[in-house]
Amino acid sequence: MLDALAQVLDRWSEPTSKVRLSLEAALPEATGFSREVVRVGLAHALRDWTGEALRALVRRELGRDAGPRGRGRSLVGGFDTTSVLLAGALPSPTLLAIVAPLAVGSAVLVRPSSGDPVTPRVVAASIAEVDPTLGECVEVVPFRAGDLGALDAFLSAECVVASGSDATISAIAARIRPPTRFVAYGHRVSVALVGRGALASSVLPEFCQRLALDIVLWDQLGCLSPLAVYAVAAEPPGLDDLAAGLASALDQAEHQLPRGHVPVAGAAAFARARAEAEVRAAAGRGLAIHGGPGNPWCVVREDTGEWREAPLYRFVRIHPLSDLEGLRTALGALAPHLAAVAIEGFGADPRHIPAGGLAHASLALGGLSIGVLPILILALSVALFTVLQLVLMHTRFGRIVRATADNRDVVRLMGVNPSRVYNVVMGLSLALASVAGILLAMRSAFTPYSGVERLLVAFEVVVLGGLGTFWGAMVGGIILGVAELVGLRFDPNAGPLYAHLLFLVGVLFRPNGLFRART
Amino acid sequence: MSDPARAVLDAKLLAWMREPVSIEWSGDEARFDRLALELFAYQFERCAPYGRWCARRGRTPATVGDWRGVPPLPTGAFKELALRSFPAEATVQVFRTSGTSTTRRGELHLDTLALYEASVVPSFVAHVLPELVQTTSSSEPAHPPLPRVRVLAPAPHEAPDSSLSHMFGVLLRVLGAQGAIGPSGFDVIGGELHFAGLWHALEEAMTQGAPLVLCGTAFTFVHALDELARRGVRLALPAGSRVMETGGFKGRTRELSRPALYALIEEHLAIPPARVVNQYGMTELASQFHDSNLRFPGAPRRKLGPPWVRARLVDPLTGGPASPGKIGVIVVHDLANTGSVCAVETADLGRADGDGFEVIGRAPGAEARGCSLAADEMLAGLGTI
């Protein structure tokens, strides 16, 4: 059974399969989505839903292949029958709502939503095509919304899965009788959280394009489409840039992925929300509106974090948020309905420590312009090297350190605690690394991965200079640094390659490094 | 009122409202248009946020040629701003929409209640007590048994910011003073239905053969009918009795479809649906619409208002008039809103129906919408309004 379902999913995830093409052809008229949105939306939604993904899911969730109860194949089994009450017009939840019960051995009754009468039939047909016996376990049961007799019969299954508004879910729950199990998917909202890292001019346009894609796919009716964007700790100009950038991206997206049919109720909510924003703007509330009555999208840059009506159909509000903790307050009563948060611009974005005027100060030496900061860093490095050298070579502490490195058992006999020496040396190393890190952050941007990038370089510097030699490390560092700079002159994209090549050559000819450690 | 221009406008409207009510009561298009444009010019200038908003849309008194061109403010704006065409210190009354502590409440600010009150009575009489039209317009006193009005809503002193309570208070006061109705009163006390009082009024009316006019919110009717059902009571109210219900069930513990509510009313009070009138109004408006079934018995049921209020259906996609027979957003132009803004875009959908309109339902507010909710049609099947 799982093999058959995996085969079904593989067919669905294949862009040129018959079932995909038939759905792409039928959905625009049935659901109102534009042809382009259907095509791209299906590609995004089904890309990861392969047969192997289903197998992995079953393995992860159930431990092994599940099957009908009482047949000894699995400890976990599905209900004899699961009724699935669909809402909305998105095809991928429909596919999964049918496949998931089948995967645990339950026959499925499906009541299609009026928003998408097509997908359930196509899913059922594709299952029957792969495995006619399994196909008999899926029955599409359309009945009109007011037919309460049919609804009650439908709800008498062992398990009922329903999507809809909270009011619908409550109403259905009230009609379900024990021991029927009820799985409900009620109100859901998703938002985007944007950090300052995403607002930099170098990354903002690309980020806005990705955000716009999340918004235009399925015309913002999907679970994961952000209905609001919260910019955390952003200055007002950053908010304005984000709003303008997103508006531009939505406008561009409209050409490639045009908005589909909007029902009267949706269009009314959309127009009303825009008009209300315009009234607040006219009252001097300090918000900005992008997208006029002729645009099939709207971006409102709000002046507070307070959640406001979300009309969907490509209507986005951008709110300021002082800190992440404020999100719960901003969402208010909607916080429990939060389904997904898209996060951008936090954590791994490049940062640097501002050096003020020092960053750009320079000295003119014989026609050359040399930066003051690099000179200071070099001077400080030499000074620290010198001090460290003096400490290690000419003080009692230095002798203990060297002796401990040479033979910890002997120094223990001398009354020295090697662990304490290790701790002090470790602390000293960290202090020096901190100084190096600060200097690095003043010279260039850094990320959480900057250390990994420099680890290889540090290893090469030490090996090239000679293990255990102090000045060797410094000379090795200067040589590799110069090699990288020279390499950049040859090829701006491959400077480090020349440094690595020089290291290889050095190791070939002097495996013990340029200098030997004194013993 | 210190503004002479406003005084002139109010005087014109009061004169219109005090003209005799007639069943035919057709609108005077030219008069409405003239007054609507005068009011727009006045409010454009006096209500700064509204004026700026109109100007940004390119709508000014110089560019608007007839009442349909007056830009309607969405009702949500009344939750955001104090939309006054008079100085704040002149405020004498603020009506607020229902809501909770976590939701914003819309507000209608008034510097006079004269127009508000003058608008209420003729509309109610024409649509709920049309047989009084002759009585109120003639000098002959009405003959008993006079109809009695029981209100299933709080009295004005219990809900001072409720426009609904104020409306019922005005009706009882004015119609009582005119001698058009018999002993009447409120049957919601302390926020609860006072069933004993209502029961007493029902018994007394039946004993004396006086027709009853039961008015109130739909959910309070449900409470009253539930109580009658619990007692196993089915009454046959005197001939001429009727019901006027208004409002929905939002946030209430029990919801009913309108046909189901009307069926319960017929079952327990012997008032057929043909004698049940729905009132369509909102806090942001001074005037109300009513079902036409008592004013024009036998004709298709539709919403009608007094001559100084008009509704039009707007296509939300184009902003233009909705095509005939098509669903659109209900926009109301209520000239009685002189102190605020006359043109209001509601959050309701409707369909034009001859000289009136039909309310289809509410455009989703989408406070908590998300996936799978665009076609959440099962609710309709589960019998809620």
Image (cartoon, coloured by chain):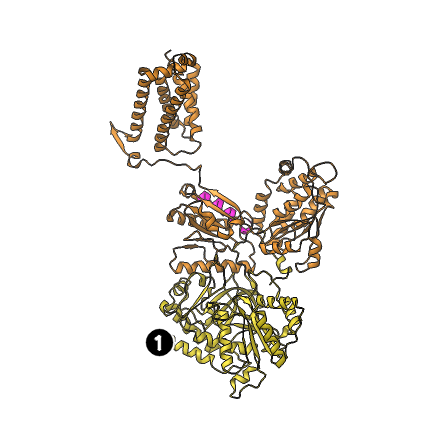
- Position of the C terminus of chain B by quadrant: bottom right
**Is A7 included in the stretch rendered in magenta?**
no
Q: Secondary structure at mark 1?
A: helix
> Mark 1: which amino acid?
Pro
**What shade has chain A been given?**
orange
Question: Where does residue A268 sit, x and y in percent of width and height?
Answer: 52, 60
Considering only vertical position in the picture, is A127 above or below B185?
above
- Report whether B378 appears left or right of A419: right
Label 1: few (<14), some (14–19) or many (≥20) C-alpha neighbours in 10 Å: few
- Report whether A416 appears left or right of B355: left
Considering only vertical position in the picture, is A52 above or below B111?
above
Question: Where does residue A425 sit, x and y in percent of width and height?
Answer: 38, 21
**The quadrant where residue A444 appears:** top left
**Most frequent secondary structure within the magenta stretch:** helix
| Residue at which label 1 appears | B4
**Is A212 included in the stretch rendered in magenta?**
yes
Considering only vertical position in the picture, is A507 above or below B22?
above
Question: Where does residue A3 sit, x and y in percent of width and height?
Answer: 69, 37
Question: Where does residue A244 sit, x and y in percent of width and height?
Answer: 42, 50
Q: Which chain is yellow?
A: B
Query: Which region is colored magenta?
Result: A205-220
- Give the chain of mark 1: B
Q: Of residues A305 and A235, which is closer to you in this image? A: A305
